[in-house]
Image (cartoon, rainbow, N blue to C red):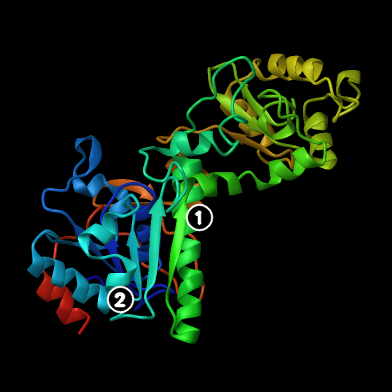
Amino acid sequence: MLDRNGPLRGVRVVEMAGLGPAPFCAMMLADMGAEVVRIARPGQAPLFGLEQKHNLYDRSRRSLTLDLRDPAQLGQAKTLIAKSEILIEGFRPGVMERLGLGPQDVTPSNPALVYGRMTGWGQDGPFSNRAGHDLNYMAISGALWSIGPAGAPPPPPQNIIADLAGGGMMLLTGVLAALTHARANGEGQVVDACMSDGAALMMVLQYGLKAGGAWDDTARGGNVLNGGAAYYRCYETSDGGYVALGPIEPQFFAALLDKLNLSDDPRFAQQYAADQDAMHAALETIFATKTRDAWQSILEDVDACFAPVLSMTEAPQNAHNIARGTFVQTDGVVQPGTVPRFLGTPSDPPTHGDAGTMTFDEALAHWA
């Protein structure tokens, strides 16, 4: 078992090993000091042929392999769940019930248990038992339609929006809120976190803008935050790099114009003009005249909402990221460090993708 420092030190969590957002939630709990026991199936291995140390969603906790079809090992899982405060599972609806580990099976012995459930489509609804991934869950939320340039299919924005932000982070928020309630009242509850719901929640600002007439939903790439504004987008530089601009507020836009010697250019007189084409074309031409690093030296100390677009190889070497310790290296693997940070109860650095295996007896002895 790992004894880790952090604000959740001593919180006992059982994680049913899975993919994507549920392990990400368990990783966050472990990063913040919770004692997470990860129950894996026999033969379970990371996707894409990875070594376990590179499977960073599983970092900072140890794993226990149990064959839940074996009644004795199923009983061991129930024993650990009875001693935990939080259970996390990410299976399709009904799987845990068929295993004999549904809420009705485990809460009688642990009425304060927070039972965190992570699914793509939710525990109910016509899609609830369908397969899917981040891209599919975003597709029905309005989020995917709003991303990308007009006249082209929406691009797959990795697995960040529905999988992690709308899934793992929503599950994390839910189980910690339920834990607060359980500790105060002795009453646990089931937390139903759903990636399609969460992806929709990530669009709450845009739905408000649409209702207020400030967002055009008829085509992609036509609004302030999705490429329609010349002052909120990326531009290519002379060396094939990119810079990101975001001076939405007038004072930041004015600072950008001043540094680019454009303050008196009539094309930039109306920042919020409906027609952004002239402004966009001018900025494309200007940024194509210098390298990305040259623009960084010109603009990085100006309040113009500017940043260079860095690759994953470059990001850990960025001066700000180095100063903040944003990235750490564990067992030779460069990875993002623990977030958020706590000044009073700082978290330990993460361990690699699996802190090792353990036996049921070892886990039980520690949680005795």
Residue 84 circle label:
2
Quadrant of the image occupied by residue 277:
top right
Q: Is residue 306 left or right of residue 332?
A: right
Secondary structure beneath dot 1 equals helix
> In terms of depth relative to the viewer, which is nearer, 178 or 56?
178
Q: Quadrant of the C terminus?
A: bottom left
Q: What's the residue at 44%, 74% (across, down)?
A: 7
- Point 63% across, 43% down: residue: 203
Identify the amino acid type marked 1: Arg
- What amino acid type is highlighted by mark number 2? Ser
- Secondary structure category for the residue under label 2: loop
Q: From this viewpoint, is residue 325 visible?
A: no
Q: Mark 1 = which residue? A: 324
Image quadrant in which you'd find residue 223? top right
Give me the residue at 81% from left, 15% from top. Answer: 278
**Mark 2 in CB contact with mark 1 (< 8 angstroms):** no
Choose the circle earlier in sequence order: 2 or 1.
Answer: 2
Position of residue 68 measured from the top left corner of the image (x, y, whole percent):
14, 60
Residue 104 is at least partly visible in this image: yes
Q: Left or right: 18 with respect to 193? A: left
